[in-house]
Amino acid sequence: MKKITILLLFVIGFWSLNAQNQRIMSKEQERNITLQNVKPVTHHYDHLRSPNANVVLSENFDSAALPAGWNVVDNLGNGGWTFVNDYSGNTLDGTPFAMVDSDGLGSVDLDTELVSPSVDVSALNSVFVSFDHYFNSYSGVDVGDVDVFDGTNWVNIYTTSADVGAWGAPDHQLIDVTAYKNANFQVRFHYYNANWDWYWAVDNVMIFEPSGDDLALVDAGPNTFVPNSPFLLNAKLYNNGSNMQDTFDVIFDIKDASNTSVYNATVNVAGAGLASGQTYDVTSVPRPNLSAGTYTLDVTVSLAGDEDATNDTYSTPLYIIDYSSTYSVGNVYSYVAFDADSTGDSGYTVTFDIASGAVTPLGSSNTTDFLIAGTFYKDVLVGVEYATNNLYFIDGSTGEAHKYGTFKGDINVYEQGPVITGIAYDKALDVGYVSTGAGFYTFDSDLNTTFVGAMNNAGIMIGIAIDNNGNVYGIDIVDDQLYSIDTATGAGTAIGSLGVDLNYAQDLGADPVTGDIYGALYQAGGAGSGLFSIDKTTGAATLIGTAGTDEYSICAIFDPTASISENQIEGLKVYPNPTNGMIAVNAQENIQNISIVNLAGQVVKTFDNDGLNAQLDISDLAAGNYILKITTDQTVGSYQIIKK
């Protein structure tokens, strides 16, 4: 691989970059890390633990010191477990934690144990151990074992040599250890086979007897959607008890600003087979369709015999928003993923002036992690959050972000737990695309992904864009080339060198009117960053204006033309699009008339109609983008088309 710095970014972010560069470059081939190594993030739910649970031991390491009764064993004398407030500003949940830092200790062998005090669990009916952790492997041979003492021997209950969890989003483990209960029960965290690897961080260790029946709501969404377009409601349940749960009801209720219910649906779940410590996803049917405004989504689980009602309901704001009025033409919307000039703008939405390249800060996104890619989706600026694959809507005037949802479906087919690195949306066809470094996918409005194919690029495709003719382009950080991507197969074809030494997360964007391609690029070796124009025939990138130093990870250009999705006019279908001349328009509402409008706002053709279907001949029009203004008996809407 050409550059390890991009891989370092995707594993730990930006914080330890300078300290690691020399060592990583010398072990580049040995490490061979790719984006596919990042595992899906899970979340911990111990704050929902039923008050009926019998907690025998609970340790959160918040004193940032060795707790009373705990013991650290350094088997090789080269260093062991420590207790810290943070690691380069990062924590698991905002509080201190236990950590063994192989990277900080350098080129020495490590074998160290963190051992809990002895507790008597012999009289309990069932015993569980839970903990939160982030295991960050460098070599793939370092090991993290979790063992329990059964009164005679140590018994392994968990082990990993691969990356698990993340800062701010630790992996949560809940393990049934009833088979090993005794009067001198202990748990230990054993880290070994490490030499100048990364680290293992552990927090919130518990030994307890859970309630029998206790289902909890732990998540619901989406938090944000666009007006007048049906969407799916989702909820995540967590089995807090020790018994398996098969049958329960989940009630979805949306209330408006006056606390009046505007949507209510009950999902009857049967045969769930939900084991203790496992999660279960529920989706509501039918789909709500709401006008712009602020709502409250309440989701409640109803389980016969539930022993704890305090965690049965999950409430979250629901924002139905249209940010299109906050965006302006002549700007490229971007995002500062890394504050290289130390001006405090990391995590900020910014704009580039498309003519001069000048940067204007808008405001903080307030997301958990940085946004790795973005585009305009249904006339709203969106950004994909690193590692979580969450999609956020972004206000074009303040930079504030609201979570829309999480990509799901085939996203895990080609790569194990991939990180989305690029996103593009074809407004004319109402089709979204995402890339994951090596895999190419489509997605729908519910963020269900469908695998298209492998892009077969040189290494990691870190940004994609679609022009006004439906052509998709991508940039590869390993060979620094521009690629064209076949939307039918996902196959990438190299066009030519950018002439820029790419580093870290970057993005492409397309002007929806002209079809020109731009890149928010970051060059290695202090050569500078900024907005670049990119030649679609040669791949050559040209800096616009003066080079900066910050790293930009979104490149998105607003489309000033109105559009409407198929869902906004009942049953609307427009095809083929792009077209050589003939267009079929179908709907479930009576179509009265259709006007063809060019991008200057001039009506160039009109068609009278009376029926659910219409046939339009626009073969006499020049090639380019047009808007269909469609009037039905119930709705007036618009749809963008492309004339070849």
Image: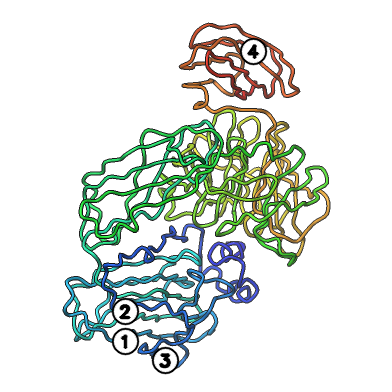
Tags 2 and 4 touching, CB below 8 Å:
no
Mark pair 1, 2: CA separation = 9 Å
Q: Is residue 80 left or right of residue 123?
A: right
Residue denoted by label 3? 76
Q: Identify the residue under disc 1.
A: 117
Going by the image, does 517 lie left or right of 610?
Answer: right
The circle on residue 173 is none
Residue identified by numbered label 4: 618
Image location of residue 303, percent across then percent down: 24, 51
- Residue 206's spot in the image, x, y percent? 33, 74
Number of the front mark, 2 or 4? 2
Q: What element carries label 2?
A: strand
The amino acid at mark 3 is Leu
Q: Which residue is drawn at 33% across and 81% down?
A: 188
The alpha-carbon separation of the residues under discs 1 and 4 comes to 79 Å
* Closer-to-camera residue (374/488): 374
Which is more foreground, mark 1 or mark 2? Answer: 2
| Whether label 4 touches label 3, CB < 8 Å | no
Q: Which of marks 4 and 3 is nearer the N terminus?
A: 3
Disc 2 residue type (three-letter): Leu
Local crowd size for mark 4, using a 10 Å CA cut-off: few (<14), some (14–19), many (≥20): some
Q: Which of 609 and 322 is in front in this view?
A: 322
Residue at 77 percent of width and 51 percent of height = 360
